[in-house]
Amino acid sequence: MSGKNYEETLIIGDVREFLHWLQDNEALFTESLHASQPERQAWLKSIRQTPYYDRPDNRGSDEVPIHPARVVTELRQAAPRDTVLVVDSGAHSYHVPHYWTAYAPNEFLILTNTGPMGYGVSVAIGAKLAQSEQPCVVIAGDGSLLMHGMEIKTAVRYNIPLIVVVINNSALGNIYLRATETGKEWPENAIEASKIPTLDCVSFARSLGADGILVEHPDQLATAFTKAFIEIDAHAKPFIVDVRCCRDCRVPNDAYSAAEGAASSLTLAR
């Protein structure tokens, strides 16, 4: 994909010796770093000035099935400030960064470049073990949970308290949205093939020894999230919040897509 391929420099040797070499030869590379610092600072400033795709109508949406932005907004309000959030891959991963605020390093974990579906629960287990004093939540789609949701059993076995929020839209969201938005460029059966039977995440969690709650209306979100944090504190095991969400909500990636298209055009022109 454009912007995700980098030239590689292969260095063969002992890592410890190489780090010592970097320390002893700092002048060889610090000059170039200092020279490019103004450019990097300007880039950071431009990022900070770029407005988020933050729409109040999405944050407070009362639509049913539920808008993912409303889910993330309610979760942020219910979650303690130092909550570690893991975001699995899927259409929901576009919504989460715009409606969630992290207040410290290592509290927002997402694999944006590789985008592997289903890693969320496993990474959350590791994050909770690494930062055991902080609450840990993973947001995953129903498609991701169908791939590696069995890792909930691992969390149950080792008494790892996680909250798993499932954006349950009965679809492989990214594929579904692309198929519905691009029309004739996709095979006729692409839309139907991207839909999946509605997963009963609460029953699935209970079958693995965890617990959960079903949310079908926006006004149930606050109570469900409050209950989830109480449950993981009381029982030290995973708790699933199964949120029935809208699969037709557009993801807020127009600016990204436009920038990626411009970069691709520039590359082709060269």
Image (tube, rainbow, N blue to C red):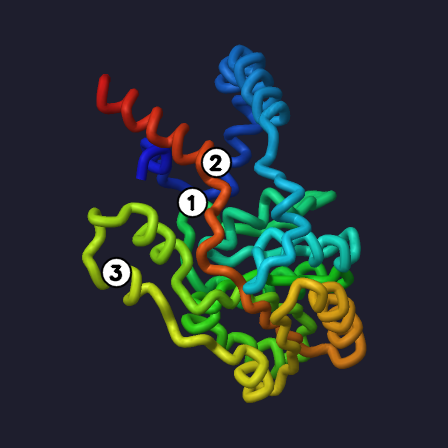
Left or right for 195, reference 36: left
Whether residue 269 is visible here, answered yes or no, is yes
Q: Residue 51 vs residue 112: left or right? A: right
Task: Please tell me whether mark 2 sits on a helix, a strand or a loop.
Answer: helix
Q: Is residue 261 above or below residue 87?
A: above
Q: To which residue does mark 3 refer? A: 190
**Mark 2 surroundings: few (<14), some (14-19) or many (≥20) residues within 10 A:** few
Q: Which residue is mark 1?
A: 113
Q: CA distance from mark 2 to mark 1?
A: 27 Å
Nearest-to-viewer mark from 3 and 2: 3
Horizontal arrangement in the rendering, residue 160 relative to residue 168 (left or right): right
Image location of residue 89, percent across then percent down = 46, 56
Q: How many marks?
A: 3
- As shown in the figure, which amino acid type bears the numbered disc 2? Phe
Distance between mark 3 and mark 2 Cα atoms: 50 Å
The quarter in which the C terminus is drawn is top left
Name the spot of residue 137 as percent of width and height, x first.
Answer: 65, 62
Please report whichever mark, 1 or 3, sits nearer to the chain's N-terminal start: 1
Residue 109 at x, y = what percent? 58, 51
Q: Residue at x 55, y 88 (%)?
A: 207
Query: Which residue does the numbered mark 2 point to in the structure image?
Result: 18
Which quadrant would residue 164 be assigned to in this image? Answer: bottom right
**For residue 23, which quarter of the picture?**
top right
Q: Earlier in the sequence, mark 3 or mark 2?
A: 2
Answer few, some or many: residues within 10 Å of disc 1's Cα (few below 14, many 20 plus, some between 14 and 19).
Answer: few
